Image (cartoon, rainbow, N blue to C red):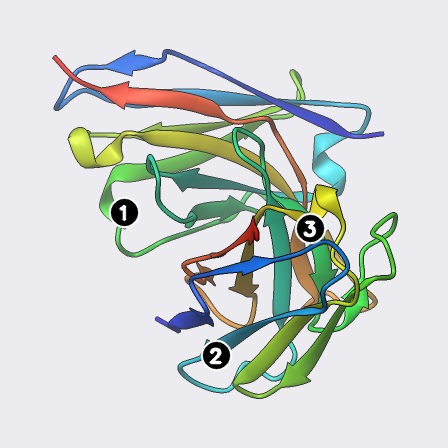
Amino acid sequence: QVQLQESGPGLVKPSETLSLTCTVSGGFIRNYDWSWIRQPPGKGLEWIGYIFNSGSTNYNPSLNSRVTISVDTSKNQFSLKLSSVTAADTAVYYCARIGRGSSWIEEAFDIWGQGTKVTVSS
Amino acid sequence: DIQMTQSPSSLSASVGDRVTITCRASQSITTYLNWYQQKPGKAPKLLIYTASTLQSGVPSRFSGSGSGTDFTLTISSLQPEDFATYYCQQSYSAPRTFGQGTKVEIK
């Protein structure tokens, strides 16, 4: 049973870089594609980006210039870096696995971490 | 970006009621539409993928339908554990986008 666990600082200062890690247990990270999603307080869900098992990435254009997602297969982890943060980046950040159906194009976020709350404040 | 619009934004219902939530995409997404349930303080949980396929372990009272731009999530007989917020999400194109959510509350 694959499980995900986010970790990282809960408080980040404005203009600094938010760094989070998602640890994958119960499965090999290279077998799947992975994603980060966030949810501002009291609001809906926003997709941040993907990292595919090939190592390639795809980011939300609204965050594109500030986002980096990477993978460390030796630790079975993938990471999120979001630079130049502002109060608008305050949110619960989730990591998620991308499950696929009978064809590659059928996809959904089928396993989620519990989420980690990040507050941007001085 | 493809905009996803859910209606209603909230609804009140009683245990045993049949509940229907609608999701509309700003352009055709064929059947690349997923539904999630989120309870307060918890991560979203996948209920249905590709518009109508029930995720393993999800009760059969949940069903999904639709194609193109219009989709529905139906709960055939609302149970106490179903009071939550429901989100649709398109997987047709990047960036992936979610609906704003529909909160199902107890009447």
Secondary structure at badge 1 equals: loop
Residue beneath disc 2 = B24
| Image coords of residue A100 (percent x, y) | 74, 57
* Quadrant hosting residue B39: top right
Residue A63: x percent and y percent? 27, 47
Q: Residue at x 13, y 21 (%)?
A: A14
Quadrant, the C terminus of chain A: top left
- Report how far apart the C-alphas of labels 3 and 2 lie in the structure: 19 Å
Chain of the residue under label 2: B
The three-letter code of the residue at mark 2 reads Arg
Disc 1 residue type (three-letter)? Leu
Rendered-image quadrant of the N terminus of chain A: top right
Q: Which residue is mark 1?
A: A63
Q: Secondary structure at mark 2?
A: strand
- Do the CB atoms of the residues marked 2 and 1 lie less than 8 Å apart? no
Q: Are marks 1 and 3 on the same chain?
A: no
Q: Which residue is mark 3?
A: B46
Residue at (53%, 34%) from the top-left corner? B40
